[in-house]
Image (tube, helix red, strand yellow):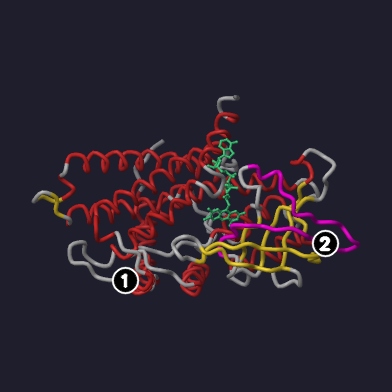
Amino acid sequence: MDLQFTTEELAFRDEVRAFLKDKLPEELAHKVKNGLRLTKQDMERWHAILNERGWLANHWPEQYGGPGWSAVQKFIFEHECALAGTPRIVPFGLSMLGPVLIKYGNEQQKNYWLPRILNGADWWCQGYSEPGSGSDLASVKTTAVRDGDHYIVNGQKTWTTLGHHANMIFCLVRTNKEVKAQAGISFLLIDMNTPGVEVRPIITLDGEHEVNEVFFTDVKVPVENLVGEENKGWTYAKYLLTYERTNIAGVGFSVAGLEKLKVVADRVQCNGKPLSQDPLFAARLAKVEIDLENMKTTNLRVIAAVAGGGVPGAESSMLKIKGTEIRQELLSLTRRAMGPYAAPFIEEALHAGYSEPAIGDEAAASAAASYFNYRKLSIFGGSNEIQKNIISKMILGL
Ligand SMILES: Cc1cc2nc3c(=O)[nH]c(=O)nc-3n(C[C@H](O)[C@H](O)[C@H](O)COP(=O)(O)OP(=O)(O)OC[C@H]3O[C@@H](n4cnc5c(N)ncnc54)[C@H](O)[C@@H]3O)c2cc1C
């Protein structure tokens, strides 16, 4: 694979840079670069800016609103966004449900739901996990029983990220209890404003409200909200997960994280020298940088395969494991580099930031909080242990 950019690709990179310089609001970039809290409005604002330019759904086919980019253009875009400090795009509609609807949804569903994902009319969340059904996802117990033109849904989902912002949830529901677990699951779109849906917050150890429990009591869902065929939901669920995992790998986040870490390691003093010159620290930094360079290539391979009509398969599991290990190592090194400055968890600082001269800027405000929060990376989207099981089955045939 030729990793040199062509003249056209370099011109595209300049176009992206100019767009980001012009359109990325400074206050959003400041928050992202310093790890400060983003509000729902912040995320919606960046979503709308990208949509206006036609650069939001960059992995969707052109006929549904994708920009028609090559794999390299997608890579360049992601890379430049990370360096500029753009907010993350909330993935549930765009990167998870969108590809499922495009592949398995009927025309009516595509025509109705896809434009609403793009224009931000719906905020989606993911109703896969349940108490007792995480790694063993096929054991989901939430039921959907057909009653005329509706399904009646009863059960509970958990760990629902940003469910408190969402008006729609895509759910795995059990429609047949008599068959093998995987053969009795359906994929249902549920309006969260329907009577019988209740969202309860889960407050995590760091005081954050990011995840929720969602309860369904006799919730009436129109049958037209079934995606694909009844009892075939497991196929769609797995397809969605490959996109989710590729997304979690977050190459762009790591590129930006490495840049930030290098700046800090040059500023912080250790035995009278910059920490970046400490042999042990420098060795860890070099290792993570090499891993990241390798992962960029794997990421390009996966993007190229998808652009060529393929589906990210076991590669998405490889990317998820390596990508999350790199992200966690970068956060760990950043926290170590900041030493005692990273220790306090100051709620207000996560909104407003604080300036620490020894570190520079406001980066220390979020170092400890990010370190702890991102332990989740190796758990959600299917834990890294589960990804190893998938790789051993799909590649090694074990
Ligand atoms: C912050 C956060 C956000 C999340 N957001 C969402 C969301 O928006 N929507 C959603 O549906 N879910 C979400 N999840 C749920 C997530 O997908 C599950 O937590 C994950 O799949 C693990 O399931 P579990 O928590 O039930 O752990 P368990 O399945 O109980 O696993 C516990 C431990 O055992 C290991 N283990 C289990 N089975 C095996 C095996 N066969 N081989 C080897 N090791 C094994 C696991 O790796 C893990 O270390 C989120 C989770 C977190 C932490």
Label 1 – label 2 distance at C-alpha? 47 Å
| Residue 48 in picture, x, y percent from top left | 51, 71
Q: Of 27 and 145, which appears nearest the observer?
A: 145
Which element carries disc 1, helix, strand or loop? Answer: loop
Quarter of the image where one finds residue 390:
top right
Image location of residue 312, percent across then percent down: 56, 41
* Quadrant for the C terminus in the image: top right
Q: State yes or no: residue 160 in magenta.
A: yes
Amino acid tagged 2: Ile
Earlier-in-chain disc, 1 versus 2:
2
Q: Which mark is residue 353?
A: 1
* Residue 214 covered by magenta stretch: no
On the picture, is 271 further left or further right than 179?
left
Side of 336 relative to 221 (left or right): left
User: Regarding mark 2 in the picture, which secondary structure is present there?
Assistant: strand
Q: Amino acid at mark 1?
A: Gly
Mark linked to residue 152: 2
Q: Nearer the viewer, residue 146 or 20?
A: 146
Q: Which residues are magenta?
A: 136-162
User: Residue 71's x, y, as percent?
Assistant: 48, 47
Residue 251 horizontal/vertical position (percent):
41, 49
Which quadrant holds the N terminus?
top left
